[in-house]
Image (cartoon, helix red, strand yellow):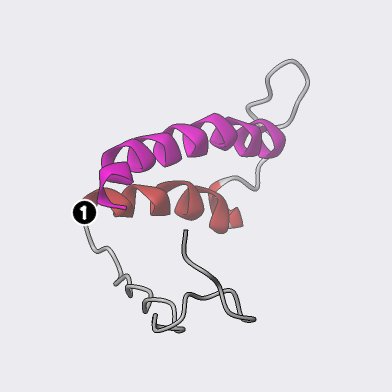
């Protein structure tokens, strides 16, 4: 068993941790799928209407709520497509 000095390192060993690897931006086309929910909810002109209503809920509200599962599916597809790149 090797002895440790006061800083917790072995004598004669390097005291600096290895430099972290820099990760560049990932410009794969699948990542553009994340922009779809953003565009769908970013511009109020797309959804600033009362009709058609569903169960008394104006279009404005159910349109916004409909984007929640769409955003989850888009995020899941991108995550599963890129998780091996880490």
Picture residue at 58% right of the left edge, 35% below the top: 68
The stretch drawn in magenta includes residue 78: yes
Where residue 35 sits, quadrant-wise, is: bottom left
The percent coordinates of residue 62 (x first, y second) are 66, 30
Q: Residues within 10 Å of mark 1 (few under 14, many from 20)?
A: few
Task: Give the residue pinned by disc 1.
Answer: 29
Q: Can you name the residue that lies furthest to the right here?
A: 56
As drawn, 21 above or below 51:
below
Magenta span: predominant SS is helix
The stretch drawn in magenta includes residue 81: yes
Q: Would residue 85 appear left or right of 19 to someone viewing this image?
A: left
Where residue 12 sits, quadrant-wise, is: bottom left
Picture residue at 65% right of the left edge, 33% below the top: 65
Picture residue at 59% right of the left edge, 45% below the top: 47
Q: Would residue 54 appear left or right of 76 to someone viewing this image?
A: right
Range drawn in magenta? 59-86
Q: Which residue is at the front of the view, 52 or 69?
A: 69
The percent coordinates of residue 57 (x first, y second) are 75, 26
As drawn, 66 above or below 14:
above
Q: Which residue is at the front of the view, 22 or 34?
A: 22
Picture residue at 48% right of the left edge, 46% below the top: 37
């Amino acid at each position: 068993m090797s002895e440790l000095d006061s800083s917790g390192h072995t004598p004669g060993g390097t005291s600096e941790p290895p430099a972290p690897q820099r990760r560049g931006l990932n410009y794969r086309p699948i990542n553009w799928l994340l922009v779809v929910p953003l565009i769908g909810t970013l511009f109020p002109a797309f959804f600033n209407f009362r009709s058609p209503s569903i169960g008394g809920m104006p279009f404005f509200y159910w349109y916004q709520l409909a984007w929640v599962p769409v955003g989850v599916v888009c995020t899941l597809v991108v995550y599963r497509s890129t998780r091996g790149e880490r």
